[in-house]
Image (cartoon, rainbow, N blue to C red):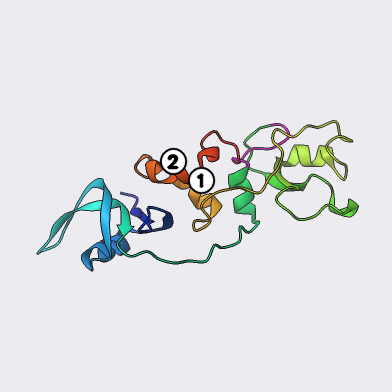
Amino acid sequence: MDGRVLVLNQNYEPLHVCTWQRAVTLMYTGKAIAMEYDGVMLRSPSIEMRMPSVVRLHEYVFRPLPEIKISRRALLARDDYRCQYCGTRAHDLTIDHVIPRERGGPQTWENLVICCRKCNNKKGNRTPREASMKLFKRPRRPRFVPYLSFATFRAALRNEAWRDYLEPFAPQLLDNSY
């Protein structure tokens, strides 16, 4: 039992990932209905129920669309925890500016990639072309459901019970692209 529950808006749009206790409270107060269940039974002296895995709110929640923020965690998730020059999954991954900052390279989604320390040292203060290195994918701003953080959304796609509810909002993530 990992205790995480996907919360959907009234229109099935993913809103949040909460604890099972919060999800049961939403269900008990009549604010949500369970869409999927985990295999675990929850028991109290007066009630026995299956633990929810996905709940949907009865009322629509209006939320402004948040801006996708650049962070190390989001960049790692976007690049699938792989070096964008050699493709390895290393523990010492760093953030690299494709066009170096000293040459006016901006701090944007389109100019930042994840790379291993070895490739970062090899590239140095040069562009990939000057260093005779090639990027696996062109860096882009990710497109996803903005209510969940990008890293949370990528991780949530691995949960089979949640996948059907998340796939319509990011089909481009299913083939490991952004």
Mark linked to residue 61: none
Dot 1: few (<14), some (14–19), or many (≥20) neighbours within 10 Å? many
Q: Quadrant of residue 107?
A: bottom right
Q: Residue at x 24, y 62 (%)?
A: 27
Image position, residue 77 (x, y; %):
58, 46
Q: Is residue 56 magenta?
A: no
Dot 2: few (<14), some (14–19), or many (≥20) neighbours within 10 Å? few
Q: Nearer the viewer, residue 83 or 70?
A: 70
Q: Is residue 83 magenta?
A: yes
Q: Which residues are magenta?
A: 79-86
Q: Residue at x 77, y 37 (%)?
A: 119
The amino acid on which the numbered mark 1 sits, given as a three-letter code, is Arg
Q: Quadrant of residue 60?
A: bottom left
Image position, residue 165 (x, y; %):
39, 46
The amino acid on which the numbered mark 2 sits, given as a three-letter code, is Arg
Mark linked to residue 158: 2
Classify residue 127 as left or right of residue 80: right
Classify residue 16 as left or right of residue 122: left
Q: Quadrant of the C terminus?
A: top right
Classify residue 23 as left or right of residue 149: left
Image position, residue 131 (x, y; %):
86, 35
Count of numbered labels shown in the rendering:
2
Secondary structure under tag 2 reads loop
Q: Are marks 1 and 2 in contact (CB under 8 Å)?
A: yes
Up-down relation of residue 77 to residue 134 (above or below): below
Q: Quadrant of residue 8?
A: bottom left
Secondary structure under tag 1 reads helix
Mark linked to residue 154: 1
Instruction: Give the CA distance from mark 1 to mark 2.
Output: 7 Å
Image position, residue 164 (x, y; %):
38, 41
Q: Nearer the viewer, residue 56 or 71?
A: 56
